[in-house]
Amino acid sequence: MNESQMVAFPAPQHLGVDSSNSPRAVPVLDISDTSSVTLPAEVPTRGYVVALAATSSGVVFAAEGVDGIEAIDFTDPSAPTAIARTTDLEANSVATDGDVVYVGGNSSGLWLLKLVTLT
C-alpha cells in the first residue's frame, strides 16, 4: 500500500451527515482495490472534524471547530500520528499553501500559521 492508494476521508458534515453523530477521528481509506475499500487506520481527534487540508509533505490539518486544529503526520499512511494541536483558536475551515496554513473561524477570524521543522 503506497501513499497514492491512501486517502484521508473527508469531514462527515460535507457529506450531509449530522455533526453530532460524526466520529472524533480522521479515518484513512485504502483505495488500492476500489472493489474492496478498507479502513486500515484512524487517528482520534479532540473535537469533531469539520474540514481537512493536506500539505505536500504529508501533514494533514484537521479543523475541529471550537476544539481548535490538529496536525497529523501521514508520511506513513498505514500509521498516521497526531503531532501537534492548538485549542487557542476556533477552526471551521482550513487550507494550505506551501508552508502556510490558513485557518478560518467564526468568531476568531482568519489565522495564518507558518510551518517550521524543529530539529
Image (spheres, rainbow, N blue to C red):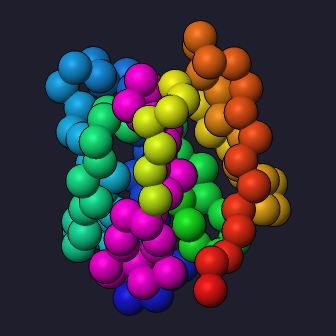
Q: Quadrant of residue 72?
A: bottom left
Q: Is residue 107 left or right of residue 41?
A: right
Quarter the N terminus occupies: bottom left
What residue is at 62 percent from the left and 86 percent from the top? 119
Looking at the picture, tell me which residue is in the foreground, 20 or 64.
64
Residue 31, placed above or below residue 63:
below
Residue extending furthest toward the right: 98
Q: Quadrant of residue 117?
A: bottom right
Residue at the extreme top of the image, as rendered: 107
**Residue range (magenta):** 61-83
Residue 86 picture location, percent across and down: 47, 44
Q: Position of residue 45 (x, y in %)?
A: 29, 48
Point 62% across, 18% down: residue: 108
Q: Residue at x 43, y 66 (%)?
A: 83
- Is 47 left or right of 85, judged from the image as shown? left
Query: Compared with residue 47, is residue 100 higher up or lower down, i.e. above or below?
Result: below
Instruction: Pick whichever, 37 or 81, lies toward us.
Output: 81
The stretch drawn in magenta includes residue 74? yes
Q: As rendered, which of 85 and 8 lies closer to the eye?
A: 85
